[in-house]
Image (spheres, rainbow, N blue to C red):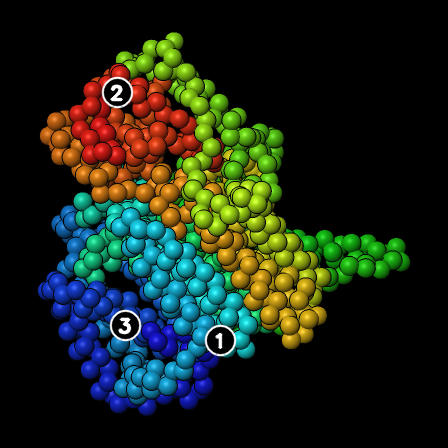
């Protein structure tokens, strides 16, 4: 992979494979057969087994496709990215085909190693035989080795590599109960690498490696926290894989949930775990992050084709430094793969040296990858494409009509052509009518007749029509606060939650632990989110009369405002055809505006913001518009001349330390980042330690063979994790509010409640923490098991 990010190739390099000896494909086929045999023998040699498995499963197809199917692409990095994306899509759809066809041949459990190895061997040999003399050659391997040996020291790549080492070490230290200085240093080092790379003369190879290594560092710093599956959505994703692996067959009947319709969290982990001989936990925590780190690289490669190098680099940096990238994306495996497919589809629209049919085929194929990977990413993509298609066709017709009407009255049409771009006209690809229609049909077909998971699609249409046509609004996500939005207060949201709980109890009769008129049934006290204690620096700041919590809040708000202003300037420059945007083609122009319209729909329609989260939607929008933030920056600093690069690097440094949480970690007294500290709201709610796992495993063993049982616990995170540990006969509920506890159910009190006296619920897009009366459990229920920080009652 040392030259994966090598730049454009010459004609001689692209044609060099044709001069390789005829025997090379035969040697390559023999090597593939040896590797596949090694995997099939299931020889468990640490490091060697995963590397060999990855080489034959992903490496060979990617290499051959890049050299064969995409050999004529001048941009070799784009060719390799497309080859990798095609390989991943082939693994997804090929495994789905195996899962569907083999049961008809009497193989009830098709998702096993022999089937995977057989298909992989056939695919690899077919690709090598089809590639012929364009397959991997000895001369190319030698050239790779020579390039690696001639590699020079680069301070930005070195800083990014050190950030990666510190991120892994910092996560391990925190998991072992140590402090978080190394984890915070990793974030600072990653930001420093980006700033130094921006400051130095633009070099594509160096930029791409710096972006990739820094992205991996930021992602692993979060994903490696905890020795078990740690996070929010990732627990449901892992449950989807557990159910699939348990049956060695994927079926929506086993887990009728929209999560289970995302093949990125069940079939793909099953293939990687089985083929590479690694635990599925490693697939979610490591492999998925290594793949997702290619998204900011793809954003950069796309930006380089439309803007100057530093604008493209700043856009990729903004995509990585946006808070969701560091805090949430490692827990959204299904969305990570979907984002990669979206980024590749967008990149395909910029290839002016590729035939239109090829670009349209690529965009449609990667669009299908989005459809089978994640539902909400698909719906946002369709909203964007629908607007793009209507506006790009409708506005020219409107302009023509107004121009003709003005001409009939002897007037001129002053704004004629203002929306046009100066780039040579390209045939449309992602927003081509046939591609858009095909993706809409694919999304409907996958979510409705195939997986019957179309509830989300119905909710999206219902929320849009209810808000835009009928004026029906519900509470929106609290994420709106980051971009200056409002919404109901936490007190109002919690009162609404408690009222809904009372209505639920009145509607469902049963034996409840607490009488309705008891003091224990009263509405609990709403608490402020748990925070990390002030550091020594934070206490020094407080001693001079400055509240460190206020400093943290103001810094974060200002960072969000700066990003918004830069984006607004970039959009203004795009619409007014500023000099830095004149290479943007018509399709990219409308796709960027369409992505902003899709984001506006999420912001304006509260029901959608509560379901998907504004910040996650903004992260998806940045795949297209992140370079516009760079345009906004460059429009401000360009007049500085040679000082423009310094100003841009300083902006990256300041925004980076604030948005990654490094500045807040230095002062303390903030909600905390699970990647930087063993404290704060997210740590208490999401982190799982050894003692908690022991208690949950004990309960699983205790319930095995006892028949149907009900288990109550706090929140969907713990609830979902327990569903992976308990027998299928157990039903896990999250009615942890004292008012809703029913007699006969097992009650699992997590460390958040036992150690901190708190409980957190996710309601209408917001996390609400309330005081949990632990003494109530001791008074009304019997303690049957305890590990110190986790207690089980009945």
* Quarter-of-image position of residue 733: top left
Residue at image position (38%, 55%) is 181
> What label does residue 60 carry, if any?
3
| Disc assigned to residue 652 | none
Find residue 627 and report its horizontal and vertical position in percent: 57, 63
Label 3 Cα neighbours within 10 Å, binned few <14 / some 14-19 / many ≥20: many
Q: Residues within 10 Å of mark 2 (few under 14, many from 20)?
A: few
- Cα distance in 3D space between marks 2 and 1: 63 Å
Q: Residue under circle 2?
A: 778
Residue denoted by label 1: 204
What residue do we see at 41% from left, 47% from top? 673
Quarter of the image that includes the C terminus: top left
**Which of the two residues, 728 or 361, is positioned nearer the viewer here?**
728
User: In the picture provided, is 739 more to the left or to the right than 8?
Assistant: left
Q: Earlier in the sequence, mark 2 or mark 1?
A: 1
Q: Is residue 342 above or below residue 685?
A: below
Q: Is residue 663 above or below residue 296?
A: above
Tell me where residue 32 appears, x and y as whole percent. 20, 74
């Amino acid at each position: 992979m040392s030259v994966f990010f090598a730049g454009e190739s010459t004609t001689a390099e692209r044609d060099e494979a044709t001069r390789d000896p005829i025997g090379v494909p035969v040697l390559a086929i023999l090597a593939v057969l040896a590797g596949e045999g090694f995997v099939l023998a299931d020889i468990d040699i640490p490091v060697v087994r995963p590397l060999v498995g990855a080489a034959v499963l992903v490496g060979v197809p990617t290499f051959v496709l890049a050299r064969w199917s995409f050999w004529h692409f001048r941009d070799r990095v784009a060719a390799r990215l497309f080859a990798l994306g095609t390989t991943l899509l082939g693994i997804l759809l090929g495994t789905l085909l195996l899962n569907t066809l083999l049961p008809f041949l009497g193989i009830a459990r098709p998702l096993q190693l022999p089937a995977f190895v057989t298909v992989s061997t056939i695919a690899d040999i077919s690709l090598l035989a089809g590639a012929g003399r364009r397959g991997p050659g000895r001369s190319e391997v030698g050239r790779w080795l020579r390039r690696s040996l001639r590699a020079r020291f680069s301070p930005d790549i070195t800083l990014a590599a050190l950030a990666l080492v510190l991120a892994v070490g910092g996560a391990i230290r925190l998991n072992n109960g140590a402090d978080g200085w190394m984890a915070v240093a990793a974030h600072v080092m990653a930001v420093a690498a980006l700033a130094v790379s921006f400051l130095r003369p633009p070099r594509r190879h160096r930029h791409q490696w710096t972006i990739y290594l820094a992205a991996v560092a930021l992602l692993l710093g979060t994903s490696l926290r905890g020795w078990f599956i740690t996070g929010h959505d990732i627990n449901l994703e892992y449950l989807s894989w557990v159910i699939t692996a348990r049956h060695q067959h994927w079926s929506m009947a086993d887990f009728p949930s929209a999560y289970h319709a995302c093949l990125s969290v069940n079939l793909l982990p099953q293939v990687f775990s089985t083929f590479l001989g690694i635990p599925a936990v490693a697939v979610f925590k490591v492999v998925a992050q290594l793949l997702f780190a290619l998204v900011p690289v793809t954003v950069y490669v796309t930006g380089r084709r439309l803007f100057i190098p530093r604008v493209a680099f700043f856009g990729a940096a903004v995509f990585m430094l946006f808070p969701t990238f560091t805090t949430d994306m490692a827990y959204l495996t299904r969305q990570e793969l979907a984002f990669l497919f979206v980024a590749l589809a967008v990149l395909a629209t910029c290839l002016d040296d590729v035939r239109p049919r090829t670009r349209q085929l690529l965009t449609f194929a990667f669009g299908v990858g989005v459809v089978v990977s994640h539902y909400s990413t698909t719906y946002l993509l369709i909203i964007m494409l629908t607007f793009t298609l209507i506006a790009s066709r409708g506005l020219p017709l409107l302009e023509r009509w107004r121009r003709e009407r003005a001409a009939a009255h002897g007037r001129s049409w002053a704004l004629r052509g203002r929306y046009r771009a100066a780039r040579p006209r390209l045939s449309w690809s992602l927003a081509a009518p046939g591609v858009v229609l095909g993706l809409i049909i694919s999304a409907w077909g996958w979510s409705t007749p195939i997986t019957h998971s179309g509830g989300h699609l119905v909710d999206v249409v219902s929320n849009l029509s209810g808000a835009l046509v009928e004026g029906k609004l519900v509470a929106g996500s609290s994420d709106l606060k980051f971009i200056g939005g409002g919404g109901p207060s936490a007190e109002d949201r919690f009162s609404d939650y408690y009222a809904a709980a009372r209505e639920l109890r009145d509607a469902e009769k049963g034996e409840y632990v607490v009488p309705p008129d008891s003091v224990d049934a009263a509405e609990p006290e709403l608490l402020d989110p748990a925070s990390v204690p002030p550091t020594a620096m934070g206490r020094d700041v407080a001693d001079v009369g400055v509240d460190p919590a206020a400093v943290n809040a103001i810094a974060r708000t200002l960072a969000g405002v700066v990003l918004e202003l830069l984006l607004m300037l970039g959009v203004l420059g795009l619409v007014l055809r500023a000099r830095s945007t004149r290479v943007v083609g018509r399709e990219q122009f409308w796709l960027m505006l369409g992505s902003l319209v899709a984001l506006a729909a999420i912001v304006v329609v509260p029901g959608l913001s509560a379901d998907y989260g504004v910040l996650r939607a903004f992260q998806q929008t940045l795949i297209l518009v992140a370079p516009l933030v760079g345009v906004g920056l460059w429009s401000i600093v360009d007049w500085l001349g040679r000082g423009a690069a310094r100003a841009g690097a300083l902006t990256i440094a300041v925004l980076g330390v604030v948005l990654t949480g490094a500045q807040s970690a230095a002062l303390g007294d903030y909600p905390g980042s699970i990647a930087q500290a063993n404290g704060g709201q997210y740590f208490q709610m999401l982190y799982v330690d050894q003692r908690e796992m022991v208690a949950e495993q004990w309960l699983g063993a205790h319930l095995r063979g006892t028949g149907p049982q009900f288990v109550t616990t706090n929140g969907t995170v713990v609830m979902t994790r327990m569903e992976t540990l308990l027998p299928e006969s157990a039903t896990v509920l999250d009615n942890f509010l004292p008012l809703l506890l029913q007699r006969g159910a097992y009650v699992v009190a997590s460390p958040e409640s036992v150690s901190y006296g708190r409980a957190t619920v996710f309601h209408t897009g917001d996390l609400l923490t309330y005081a949990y009366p632990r003494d109530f459990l001791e008074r009304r229920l019997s303690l049957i098991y305890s590990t110190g920080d986790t207690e089980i009652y009945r």
